[in-house]
Amino acid sequence: MACKDKELLLHAYSDGELDLVRSLEIEEHVKTCAPCAQELGEQQTLGKGIRSANLYHRAPESLRARIIATHHAALTGGSEQSGRVESPLRSVRRRPVLEWLAVAAAVIIALGLGIRLIPGVLNARRGDLVAEELVASHIRSLQPGHLMDVVSTDQHTVKPWFDGKLDFAPPVLDLADQGYPLIGGRLDYVGSRNVAALVYQSRKHYINVFVWPDDGTEAKAPEFTSRQGYNVICRSNGGMQLCGVSDVNSEDLRQFMKKVSR
Amino acid sequence: MRGDTRETSGRLDFEQLVLPNLDAAYNLARWLVRNPHDAEDVVQEACLRAVRFSGGYQEGNARAWLLRIVRNTAYSFLEKKRPGDLAEEFDETIHAGEPMQRDAETILVQLVESQKLQEALEGLPVGFREAIIQRELEGFSYKQISEVMDVPIGTVMSSLARGRAQSRERLLRGPGREVPRGMQR
């Protein structure tokens, strides 16, 4: 039996919840106390077992669809009502001359501004399209058999696999020791070009990292967007554009992207 | 005008707070109510509540915030439909005593890879079960778990310790030797 006064601390220790001093105390203690060492070993075996077994129940697609539909119905139901209160056509007819002049002036100003803004707007629009494509690719990749072309947790297998398949060499990092094991890679097509997709795992969630050369002319996805429940975070680094897409929460994804684009 | 902002913020809350955490919501619900059908009902109800009460979300971890709503919804469900599931917690006793055999860890390694692990976890009192699920499957810190469960951090720590001890017992001794519910103490 483990020492009574150490039992809770052993749990906190394997959960990484102890401060440095107390962690060191525990490490010292288990060196000399066999029952506590055994207890710790068993705790860790159990924890590893729970994490690696297939125990995470993902939401069924039908449930996701139903929830989205219910939500949208609730939203559009509200706007339809307000639309009925004031028909846009009727209010146009009633508008007096002065107001028409104001409208005309506004249109002219808007046109002037618009011409200046159009390139910016177009780029932003293209960026949005890229984000949309990224999320679509991510979702497609989660369907059975689509996630990976090369299955390997070894960066030295994944990186050479892209040789000859792309006109650039994507940075492939192994982040297993930081809780994001690399599990494979895949060729994908986003923003009218071939891109590398690296697949990482974060606990039971997948993260697709799409990589393509950043030559400044290509449309850039916005730095952060969220679509259909997936977060997209993009960073430029070393002449490459990296976009991470996942259902992990935005803060975790940001942390991960910091590591992967280091 | 007011309707507009409410509508936009409703959509934002839903897309940023709810949708990305749907898997986590379902997973927790599934482990709390222990069957897929009820879990779906709980998650759907929780999502409605989440959008309605999204004003209560301030900052911090959106997943923990949503899971707290899921948990409360699941508990209300259990209170109404299966109060026995909740009462279990108070009857809980740890099989103390007999030290584990020398080779316990080797046996454990084989057992945790099997279907038995799921059964061992499902057999735990609900409070221990949810602490373990949040810690091991969501990777939550003690602090986040304490927010979801609305208990002090010390309670999280002891729930994890006792839950783990019990699931290990169940694995090593098998549920067959469990004292029947209601006859414990």
Image (spheres, coloured by chain):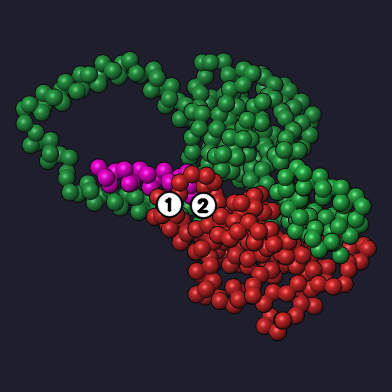
Give the residue number, with chain letter if any, for mark 1.
B56
State the quadrant of the C terminus of chain B. Answer: bottom right
Marked residue nearer the N-terminal end (1 or 2)? 1
Q: Determine the image quadrant of residue A182.
A: top right
Rendered residue at 88%/67% (across/down): B100
State the quadrant of the N terminus of chain B. Answer: top left
As drawn, the chain in red is: B
Residue B159 in percent (x, y) is at 68, 63
Give the residue number, with chain letter if any, for mark 2.
B65
Q: Chain of mark 1?
A: B
Q: Which SS does the magenta portion mostly show?
A: helix
Q: Is residue A68 visible?
A: yes
Residue B179 sits inside the magenta stretch = no
Q: Are marks 1 and 2 in contact (CB under 8 Å)?
A: yes
Label disc, if present, on residue A92 of the rendered structure = none
Rendered residue at 15%/26% (across/down): A103
Q: Is residue A196 visible?
A: no
Q: Determine the image quadrant of residue A3.
A: bottom right
Q: Chain of mark 2?
A: B
Q: Read off the magenta span.
A: B1-20
* For residue A13, side relative to residue B104 (left or right): left
Dot 2: element: helix
Residue B11 in percent (x, y) is at 39, 45
